Amino acid sequence: MRSSAKFSAAAVAAALALTTLTACGGDSDSGGDGKVKIMVGGLDKVIYMPAMLTQRLGYFKSEGLKVQLLTEPAGVQATTSLIAGDVQGVVGFYDHTLDLQVKGKQVESVVQLAQAPGEVEVVSNKAAGEMKSPKDFKGKKLGVTGLGSSTDFLTKYLAVDGGVKTSEFTPVAVGAGQTFISALKQGSIQGGMTTDPTVAQIVEQKIGKVLIDMRTPEGSKQALGGLYPSSSLYMNTDWVNGHKETVQKLANAFVKTLKWMSTHSAEDIAAKMPSDYAQGGAKLYAEAIKSTLPMFTKDGVMPSDGPATVERVLKAFNPNLKNATVDLKKTYTTEFVEKAG
């Protein structure tokens, strides 16, 4: 996350413009009446599917919660909204909690939705001959959702791990979905990191190929050396401590969804989601869900070795974290998911 204070207002304004739901800013003390606003780093991304699915299954409502889901195309802007106090929670990548801690902000994952990034590094067909691994990132323009986002973090790690300095390639903020696909088609990027359903559409349209696949625990271990907890519900620690009953209800709802996902097919899940999420067609959308399903946890519990992997990955390229001491125990809690039925 970069200079959050500078673009906080702009990011929040963009977030509100991007969603069909209305919201009142600065409502950081919500929660006591069951009203909670959650910003999602891309509601239609399969990696963040549990947020909308929980609402569609009626699990928020059955817990007595009135949850308003807002959307932002990149996780870094979602984080800005949380720090500004305009939302009470974010469904985004866990790695932001470490990045924020060294900047003096105490944020924690309360439900760990995923144990692998769910991200894929794709390469355009045109550049596929010269880009066969991260060693070939040098001199390339690579798409990320936003600068300071988790796709940016992971791209930098893969580069450094492949012997390429972060100054030797250019990350380009191209969002996800159609904006990412357009950038790849036009050649303004040679490759980039994105998620399903964008990956499925790129492969289906034959405009690019999968270079590195981190949609499964195995893929995460191969690329990053371990499980990489990613999608999570994270919140300001002070807010969590002051609204434990509400947080418990949120955890109950999300854990029910994770259990439901683990016992239903990709087609069943696709049928519950808004129809406009299946931009490449229902069949392709179900395939995208199927490819990504292995990343999700079944119980919302943080994998025991996950936080250390995230810290190692971030320290490999992030100058803010390199020499900083991170208290990993303060970046997540299992208190609520362990009580969830």
Image: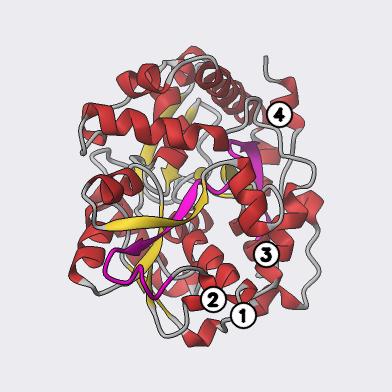
Lower sequence index among marks 1 and 4: 1
Between circles 4 and 2, the one closer to the viewer is 2
Distance from disc 1 to disc 4, alpha carbons, whole Å, reads 41 Å
> Can residue 56 be seen?
yes
Question: Is 236 placed left or right of 208 in the picture?
Answer: right
Q: Which amino acid does label 2 sit on?
A: Lys
Q: Are marks 1 and 2 in contact (CB under 8 Å)?
A: yes
Lower sequence index among marks 1 and 3: 1
Q: Name the residue under label 1.
A: 163
- Residue at image point 57% right, 84% down: 165
Q: Are marks 1 and 3 in contact (CB under 8 Å)?
A: no
Distance from disc 3 to disc 2, alpha carbons, whole Å, reads 17 Å
Residue 205 point in image, percent of width and height: 21, 49
Could you tell me which quadrant the C terminus lies in?
top right
Q: What residue type is labelled 4?
A: Phe
Q: Mark 2 points at which residue?
A: 135
Q: What is the span of residues highlighted in magenta in the rendered image?
A: 104-131
Q: Do the residues labelled 3 and 2 touch (CB within 8 Å)?
A: no
Distance from disc 4 to disc 3, alpha carbons, whole Å, reads 27 Å
Judge whether 321 appears above or below 266 on screen.
below
Question: Is 324 placed left or right of 170 in the picture?
Answer: right
Lower sequence index among marks 4 and 2: 2
Element at badge 4? helix
Q: How many labels does the image show?
A: 4
Mark 3: few, some, or many residues within 10 Å (few <14, many ≥20)?
A: many
Residue 300 point in image, percent of width and height: 65, 31
Q: Name the residue under label 4.
A: 336
Element at badge 3? helix
